Image (cartoon, rainbow, N blue to C red):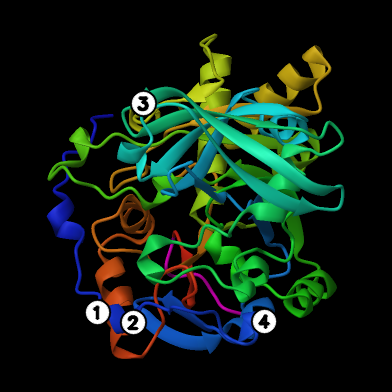
Amino acid sequence: MKIPSIQISEYDYPLPSDRIAKYPLSNRDESKLLTITNGTITDYSFKHLPELLTANTLLVFNNTKVIKARLQFKKPTGASIEIFCLEPHNPADAALAFQQTQQVEWHCMVGNLKKWKEGVISTEAITANGIIKIEATLVQRESDGAIIRFNWDNPTTTFADLLEAMGQTPIPPYLEREAEAIDSVRYQTVYSKYDGSVAAPTAGLHFSETVLDQLTRKGIQKAELTLHVGAGTFKPVKSENITQHEMHTEHFVVTRNTLEQLINHDGPIIAVGTTSVRTLESLYIAGVKCAKGKPFDLVSQWDGFNETSALPLKESLQTILDYLIKKHLDNFKAATTIMIAPGYKFKVIDGLITNFHQPKSTLLLLIAALIGENWKKVYDHALSHNFRFLSYGDSSLLMKHQDFSLR
């Protein structure tokens, strides 16, 4: 399949700043929910989601947990240096990085980097183990940041403990405000489990315990996977043609149990959020590459267009499951830089629950790939009917085939 030559300017729309939700609603499930059926758009409250899904639906959630990734340090001169932890470098595995005591290295963005040429900067954190001094050393400059080594003087305190004690929630820059106490709770899904994201999988922010319980009572199945969201999710498309845009790398984990759920399921599969979509579609492509005898621990940007195959979904996923069984592994770990844009053929999902995304973004391209030119109608409706946009905004339920029945 040919890589699409798409002008990003075709995926633009006017987004006034007052339509960006700066704060979450009082109750998660009272956000609006837009659906489109046979070209007709209907507005609901998110709490009605269980009524709109058929009982044979499988919802797939990203259970990543947002870390308090913004850290404030000071130079001996008094200059403030903000370090934004993006992803672990040594050790590179997120779980191991958070468990480290005394030393760890991360890829970071650094505010005021020009004022930090060399040397060690430090700060203190008030933890359950007392006041702990943390030092940061600039190990290596990178094109978009730096590798930072953190050292601290208490071997009973993990890096996860330090982040919780001294870090700030990394709310998106387009909120144009500092993180507040409410963000530590609301910029996190109620089902988050595994530390690693520096941005929330925001489609999941609408789910309350009440809605989850109602879904269970209706018999709707739930599966979980983990994709740690990086700051690249906010990376704008600066090139006019998307073929020149370089996607960011994200790491994901899919358990054997989730693979088995996907293989054994015969109804609609609906992803909660674009991160779940990217993981599921990458999983299929990984299975195709595995079946072809190719390396399959990285799904590259254009693999969705280049790795064409008639391999059925369940056979692709079974290939991955067989590999895990053979290697005595409990989960499949891989990385993806997948680009999903118009022309992409979805192999796994039938629908998507998602927020309203920024103009000229790769996430908007994903929406257009799913529902075609209807994306314009959906976004025009949302703008004209007072929907709230972006991370703390309202939601939509979009199906690959727009003639689906609401029940």
Q: Over which residues does the magenta segment extend?
A: 401-407
Contact (CB < 8 A) between labels 4 and 3? no
Looking at the rendered structure, which numbered label has been put on residue 142? 3
Looking at the rendered structure, which numbered label has been put on residue 19? 2
Three-letter amino acid code at the position of disc 2 = Arg
Q: Quadrant of the N terminus?
A: top left
Rendered view: 274 above or below 300:
below
- At 72% from the left and 63% from the top, the residue drawn is 56
Looking at the picture, how far across and down is residue 225, in whole percent?
68, 45
Three-letter amino acid code at the position of disc 4 = Glu
Query: Distance between the Cα atoms at labels 1 and 4?
Result: 32 Å
Looking at the picture, how far across and down is residue 178, in whole percent?
47, 69
Contact (CB < 8 A) between labels 1 and 2? yes
Q: Is 403 included in the stretch rendered in magenta?
A: yes
Looking at the picture, how far across and down is residue 90, in whole percent?
61, 22
Left or right, 34 with respect to 209, comes to left
- At 56% from the left and 57% from the top, the residue drawn is 201
Three-letter amino acid code at the position of disc 3 = Glu
Query: Distance between the Cα atoms at labels 3 and 1?
Result: 34 Å
